[in-house]
Image (spheres, grey):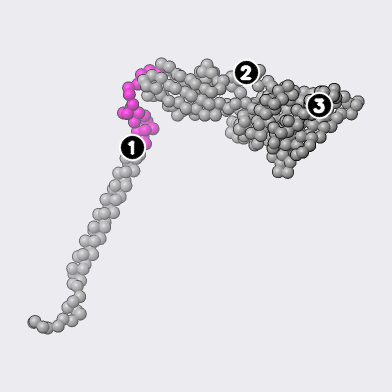
């Protein structure tokens, strides 16, 4: 009836309509969740299929030009390792279709040689392989006892200890022997030597500044090089002279050494036993006793 007022019960929404709306919302959410789950499963299956195709060379067969039997291996290096050595040690791929060659495995095989710092292997279609390697360069020699025998290894400026490959003995004959460093086995090789860059700086600087004196260097004892208070290296020469260097200001210490050597030569003095250059503003020269000269 017009003008008749309504109570709050008349204004309340119908519970039947509210129930229907609630179920529709739930069904809508359920279908949305199912769609998301299905999409995630489809993406996962596609990703797995792509990975499987890549691992099995299917992608390469689809996207690369046609391949032929391997005819040539182009070998490049910045060091001394030869292609013949790689062939003799079964590091080069055997004749087969280029598509069947696993370049990742070839790279891993090359990196098994401790002298090789890095390697890259690439296919050149339709019938070639390009192998490029970089090698560790020798900075010093080191002798390591293994299985009741002593073997000679080389140490790079970065401290890597490596088994020399294709290195002519005469090319490293003037390198001093490194002593006093801990030898720690790591897999088939060894842990890198700490502070090797300082030893390399000493060797390079001495060879350039005092080549005649450097030729007499036989060993470098780096036992105290890691010391916090006094990091030093002790060089022993073929004339049984010990030369002590501080880890810092090496070129300045070599200038002091040059002055001392020139002075003793000009004055016809002999019998030097030790030259300590590790002190900042002076050098201490010790002479042998007369009966020891």
Name the N-terminal-most of marks 2 and 1: 1
Task: Return the disc, 3 or 1, that comes first in the chain's sequence.
Answer: 1
**Label 3 element class:** helix
Q: Which residue is mark 3?
A: 263
Query: Is there any visible trace of residue 185 in the rendered image?
Result: no
- Identified at 38% across, 19% down, the residue is 127
Position above or below: 272 against 169: below
Would you name the residue on which mark 2 appears?
Answer: 168
For residue 33, which quarter of the picture?
bottom left
From which residue to which does the magenta span run? 51-70
- Image quadrant occupied by the C terminus: top right
Between the residue at mark 3 and the residue at mark 2, the CA separation in whole angstroms equals: 37 Å
Q: Residue 49: which disc? A: 1
Q: Going by the image, does 141 lie left or right of 238?
A: left
Q: Is residue 242 above or below residue 31?
A: above
**Location of residue 192 in the rendering, given as x and y in whole percent from the top left corner:** 62, 34
**Residue nearest the observer in this picture, 209 or 89:** 209
User: Is 208 inside the magenta-drawn segment?
Assistant: no
**Which residue: 59% across, 33% down?**
187
The disc, 3 or 2, on the residue closer to the chain's N-terminal end is 2
Relative side of 73 to 163, left or right? left
Quick check: 49 above or below 37?
above
């Amino acid at each position: 009836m017009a003008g008749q007022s309504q109570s709050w019960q008349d204004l309340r929404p119908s519970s039947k309509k509210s129930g229907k709306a609630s179920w529709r919302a739930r069904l809508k959410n359920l279908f949305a969740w199912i769609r998301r789950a299905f999409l995630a499963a489809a993406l996962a299956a596609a990703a797995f299929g792509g990975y499987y195709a890549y691992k099995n060379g299917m992608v390469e067969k689809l996207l690369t030009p046609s391949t032929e039997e391997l005819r040539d291996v182009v070998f490049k290096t910045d060091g001394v390792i030869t292609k013949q050595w790689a062939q003799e040690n079964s590091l080069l791929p055997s004749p087969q279709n280029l598509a069947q060659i696993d370049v990742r495995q070839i790279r891993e095989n090359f990196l098994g040689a401790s002298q090789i710092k890095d390697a890259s292997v690439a296919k050149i279609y339709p019938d070639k392989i390009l192998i490029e390697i970089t090698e560790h360069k020798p900075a010093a020699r080191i002798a390591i006892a293994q299985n009741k025998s002593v073997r000679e290894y080389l140490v790079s400026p970065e401290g890597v200890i490596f088994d020399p490959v294709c290195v002519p003995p005469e090319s490293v004959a003037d390198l001093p022997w490194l002593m006093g460093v801990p030898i720690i086995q790591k897999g088939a090789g060894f842990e890198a030597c700490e502070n090797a860059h300082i030893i390399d700086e000493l060797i390079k600087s001495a060879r350039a500044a005092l080549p005649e004196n450097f030729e007499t260097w036989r060993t470098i004892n780096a036992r105290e090089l890691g010391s916090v208070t006094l990091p030093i290296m002790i060089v022993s020469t073929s004339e049984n002279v010990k030369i002590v260097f501080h880890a810092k200001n090496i070129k300045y210490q070599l200038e002091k050494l040059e002055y001392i050597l020139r002075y003793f030569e000009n004055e016809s003095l002999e019998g030097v036993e030790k030259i300590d250059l590790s002190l900042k503003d002076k050098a201490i020269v010790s002479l042998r006793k007369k009966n020891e000269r």
